[in-house]
Amino acid sequence: LVKISSEYVKSFEVEDKLMPSTWIVLRIDGRHFHQFSDKHEFKKPNDERALKLMNACAEAMFEEFPDLVFSYGVSDEYSFVFKKTTELYNRRSSKIVSMTVSFFTSVYVMKWKDFFPDKDLKSIPSFDARTVCYPSTKIVRDYLAWRQMNFDLHLLGKGVFIPTDYKLATAFSFVGHINNQYNTCFWKLIESGMTKSEAQNRLKGTQTQHKNEILFQLEVNHSDLPAIFRKGSCVFRGKVTE
Ligand code: DGT
Ligand code: MG
Ligand code: MG
Ligand code: MG
Ligand code: MG
C-alpha cells in the first residue's frame, strides 16, 4: 500500500467560492429543448402544461432550499435568487449548481405525469445551470428584466433596449409585452396559412405597434393572452425574513 498525503491530493481542487454578501442568481435552462419540445409535441409557441411543470419544479426548489427568495421562469428556463447572506454549501458554486440542477431535473421527471398524464417521456430531459453574483437589488431587477426580454430576443431583430431606470413592476409590464409577442405573431401567421418563411418576412423589422396591428388583424389582442404566456412566472416566499 502506498501512503498518499491527503493535503497533496486536495491541493488540486480549485476554489470556487462565490463572492460574499451578494445575491446569488442561479439560472437553470433546458438542454436541447428545441428538440425536446418537438418530440413531446408541446403547443406552439406556449405550452401551458409544460410551463406549469416548470413552475412546480420551482416550487419544489423553494421547499428544498430555504435561502431562496425569488424566482422567475420563462420558456425552458428558471432563474433563482438566493439571499445575500446565504451560506448554502459554503457558497461553493459547483456544489450549488450541481445540487440544485440535479434536484430540479429529478422533480421534472417525477412530476411529468402529473402534468402530462397522456404523454410518456420519450427522451431524457436535462438542464444546464450557472451561478452569477449581483451586488445590488437594482442589478438583480435589471437581470430579471433582461431574462424576460431575452426570451426569443434574437428573433425580434432589432429595436429592443434595456431601460436603466424603472421599478420592478413597471419593468415587468413593459417588458412582458414585447417578450412573447414575436412568437405569438409568428405562430398565428402560420395558423392563418402562411409558410414559416412567409411569416418571417412579414415580421422582419416590425416594431411592437406594428406587431400589435398584425395580431389585431388576426383577431388576437396580445393583452388578452394569458399572463403566463405574456410575462412568465414567479415563485417567491410570502414572508422574507431579512
Ligand atoms: P440549449 O439551451 O442551448 O441546450 O438549446 P435549446 O434548444 O433548449 O434552446 P433555448 O433554451 O435557447 O430555447 C428554448 C427552446 O425550447 C426553444 O427552441 C423553444 C422551446 N420551448 C420552450 N418553451 C416552449 C413551449 O411552451 N412550447 C414549445 N413548442 N416550445 C417551447
Ligand atoms: Mg441552454
Ligand atoms: Mg434550453
Ligand atoms: Mg432557454
Ligand atoms: Mg457526498
Image (spheres, rainbow, N blue to C red):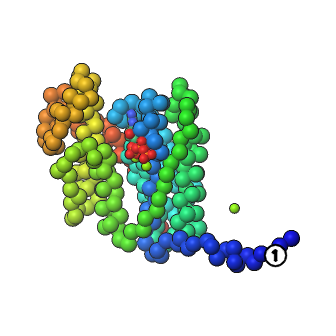
The answer to whether residue 78 shows anywhere in this view is yes
Residue shown at 51%/31% (left/top)?
A: 116
Q: Quadrant of residue 4?
A: bottom right
Q: Which residue is mark 1?
A: 3
Q: In the visual, does 97 lie left or right of 166? A: right
User: Any atom of ligand 5 within 8 Å of the CB at mark 1?
Assistant: no
Q: Tell me: residue 31, above or below residue 122.
A: below
Query: Residue 93: x percent and y percent?
Result: 53, 66
Q: Quadrant of residue 196?
A: top left
Residue shown at 35%/71% (left/top)?
A: 136
Depth order, front residue of 9/85: 9
Q: Residue furthest top?
A: 193
Q: Residue furthest front?
A: 2
Q: In the visual, does 19 lie left or right of 178? A: right
Query: Residue 214: x percent and y percent?
Result: 16, 32
Q: Quadrant of residue 63?
A: bottom right
Query: Residue 59: x percent and y percent?
Result: 50, 49
The answer to whether residue 240 shows anywhere in this view is no
Depth order, front residue of 121/229: 121
Query: Residue 152: x percent and y percent?
Result: 31, 44
Q: Residue furthest right?
A: 1
Residue shown at 24%/39% (left/top)?
A: 182
Three-letter amino acid code at disc 1? Lys
Category of crowding for the residue at label 1, using alpha-carbon neighbours closer than 10 angstroms: few (below 14), some (14–19), many (at least 20): few
Disc 1 element: loop
Q: Quadrant of the N terminus?
A: bottom right
Q: Tell me: residue 65, above or below residue 75.
A: below
